[in-house]
Amino acid sequence: MGSKSYGNLFDLASGDLLDIPQTPRALPRVMTVPGIISDVDEYGVNAGDSDISSLRPRERKIIVANFLPLNAKRDLETGKWGFSPDKDSILLHLKDGFSSATEVIYVGSLKVDVDVSEQDEVSQKLLEEFNCIPTFLPQDVQKKFYLGFCKQHMWPLFHYMLPMCPDHGDRFDRALWQAYVSANKIFADKVMGVITQEEDYVWIHDYHLMVLPTFLRKRFHRVKLGFFLHSPFPSSEIYRTLPVREEILRGLLNCDLIGFHTFDYARHFLSCCCRMLGLGYESKRGHIAVDYLGRTVYLKILPVGIHMGRLESVLNLPSTAEKMKEIQQKYRGKKVILGVDDMDIFKGISLKLLALEQLLRQYPSIQGKIVLIQIINPARGSGKDVQEAKKETYSTVKRINERYGSPDYEPVVLIDRPVPRYEKSAYYALAECCIVNAVRDGMNLVPYKYIVCRQGTPCMDQALGISADTPRTSTLVVSEFMGCSPSLSGAIRVNPWNIDAVAEALFLAVTMSDLEKQLRHEKHYNYVSSHDVAYWARSFSQDLERACRDHYSKRCWGVGWGLGFRLVSLSPNFRKLSTENVVSAYRRSSSRAIFLDYDGTLVPETAIVKSLSPEVASALEILCSDPKNTVFVISGRGRASLTEWLSPCENLGIASEHGYFIRWSNSSDWETSGFSENLEWKKIVEPIMRVYTETTDGSNIEPKDSALVWHHQDADPDFGSCQAKELLNHLEAVLVNEPVVVNRGRNIVEVKPQGVSKGVVTEKVLNRMSENGNPPDFVVCIGDDRSDEDMFESITSTLTARSSPVSSPEIFACTVGRKPSKAKYFLDDVSDVEKLLQGLGNASNAKPRYSTPLKVSFESTA
């Protein structure tokens, strides 16, 4: 059951919550008609008159994130704001992955409040000096957006915390959601103000801006949009509790490329798309892709890296070497275990301390020989949970030190203050082991930094008197619930909740042989050094370019309102079928063939009652009574059902079970069209399908005269799809020598005789009409699913081979629903098909048919 949409997203963002002026912008090209670019900008100036338009534009990448990669500080004497690059920001470092000719523009908020009277001056300064566009959010919106919706709803939920009670996550607050949407709208205005052409690439970062793509896609249909999620993406069982779950999913699907740190996060996202939006996915030449209304949305799985040069430059500082000497002296004779974590409930600091306590209790021989140095970074949020975690950490440290310490020895050293980068680097470089024990973390780059610092630099080696050929070693204990864990195959992976296992891992880490430490270190360093932040940015950028390669080869339509907005992208030759044009051609013709699918074409796919509506039945009767018409319903349904539902239409041709059985009219006999009547293979297939039915709740077997079909539409989407793949492989293996084909369709696996398809039916009907001296000069073929594509292809190939350029028939191959198809036309739904049939019926010259219906033989032509 879909969640209720909030209504019109754009009205919401500009409603009573705040009054935000639109960012003025002058765009050189605008979309005037779906899929058509105009050369006139919104101020009426022809862009072609400008000399600049003849120049090739410089490639631009617009990086959008919650915060700009800047530090801000007000000068106490002058009162003016001063800004400097945040040298630790990943957003700043990712430029290294782009070519030097690329212009990079940043859009985001500042971490300080700037008075309204100063905002214009600050904006100008940031644009000129740093290529940054600040988004100034009103204070009340900023608080509700960031500290409210992002930190109280999104961040806990994406880290697998459900709001089960007020003490562990707040209930969903609609006002905070409104602020989230409003903030995203402000970001969208700023981005739209800086885009000068749809060749610009926009790369959005993290969960703060998940509906921003919807705003941008609505304004620029062909905008090149990438999104990277730096946090975990929860499983569908967790995510589905979010009241605005579909709105956020559709926001992400309005991108061209979505990036995740691990396959687990991508898999959870795909599962949510499947369960909540009914979308499937496939692998296209190694790339995971979701087909979304004709658009292909690609997924990229690549963990972010670190900036090697930045870290190595810190290691070369004299202050770093001095600090290392100090640490060496202080902890001489002891093995240092290092932990560096933010103070929050997901970093597992308390669990880490309990594991250390267990280690000291279980192995008394190492007491006095190891020390855990736990550096605590300042908390990014505040609240009861943070305070409780901090209190528990301090009490646990005190207990351990009192029980296992001595006047000159503390097993745990807690550093709870801002620690300069050079000091952290010194601890990294000297630690025998690094443990990161988070219970849930999107990525966590602490292990990467530790590995690089343990590798050292020539300058650092010289300062410390270390030989250049000294073997480098490191050991890592990492939680399996972190994004960096899959890429660190040489680390000791642990379940942080298992205190005993973590204690054993720490003991293994501090007692491991030097050779093993060296081999593990080399493996990790080779990966970290080759997969740095530049590699990550370059790889994402290349995939985004590839994902956007076909933007201008299709026509685009915007569909839906608010957060339900999405873009339908189809071939330029694919257009909606005009009833007027079809009726006009129908009147001009003298020999007509009409082919219709049943489910999803004449009757809605979701209908409980599958019989024809009186309106459709009446239209079919009129069409069948016209002597110029040959009308066929071609369906996968069985003979009995179709005979019952179509009984009012005396002269209607019926092909059941995809054409295995064919009947020209009610007075004709059913024929098998020369197909093999040997169905012994069913004895092999049915027991296998029965096993899968028993093990897959919600599945069932549909027996047909010529086929067996396994349905899983009522099963769990993921499990049903998995079982269908396994069943397909199983059946293909055991039926390799049987005269059958195994097909997988929408929620089905079907086994049927070889050569049976709807395309064979249309080919034989058209050939027989020509042999009888009535070659068709008008053909309509309508269907809605994959099996109907055979009809569209067969009609085109058959008639093209038989006709000359002068006397080519008019063909109207039409699919139901706007989606990629071999047909050239589409109708939106069954009601449109009904209107078309009624229009053709009204245009028919309703004369009595031949007293004896023409009978057609469908013997095999083989």
Image (spheres, rainbow, N blue to C red):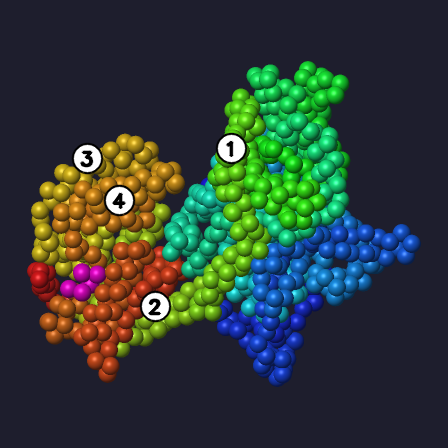
Q: Nearer the viewer, mark 4 or mark 3?
A: 4
Q: Position of residue 133 (x, y in %)?
A: 70, 60
Disc 1: CA contacts within 10 A as few (<14), some (14-19) or many (>=20): some
Disc 2: CA contacts within 10 A as few (<14), some (14-19) or many (>=20): some
Taking the spot 8% from the left edge, 47% from the top edge, the residue there is 678
Quadrant where the image shows the C terminus: bottom left
Question: Which of pointers 2 and 1 lies earlier in the amino acid sequence?
Answer: 1
Amino acid type, mark 3: Pro
Q: Is residue 643 above or below residue 632?
A: above
Q: Position of residue 835 (x, y in %)?
A: 35, 62
Question: Which of pointers 1 and 3 lies earlier in the amino acid sequence?
Answer: 1
Amino acid type, mark 2: Lys
Taking the spot 35% from the left edge, 66% from the top edge, the residue there is 825
Q: Which residue is mark 2?
A: 824
Q: CA distance from mark 4 to mark 3?
A: 14 Å
Q: CA distance from mark 2 to mark 1?
A: 57 Å
Q: CA distance from mark 2 to mark 3?
A: 42 Å
Amino acid type, mark 1: Ile
Q: Which residue is mark 3?
A: 687
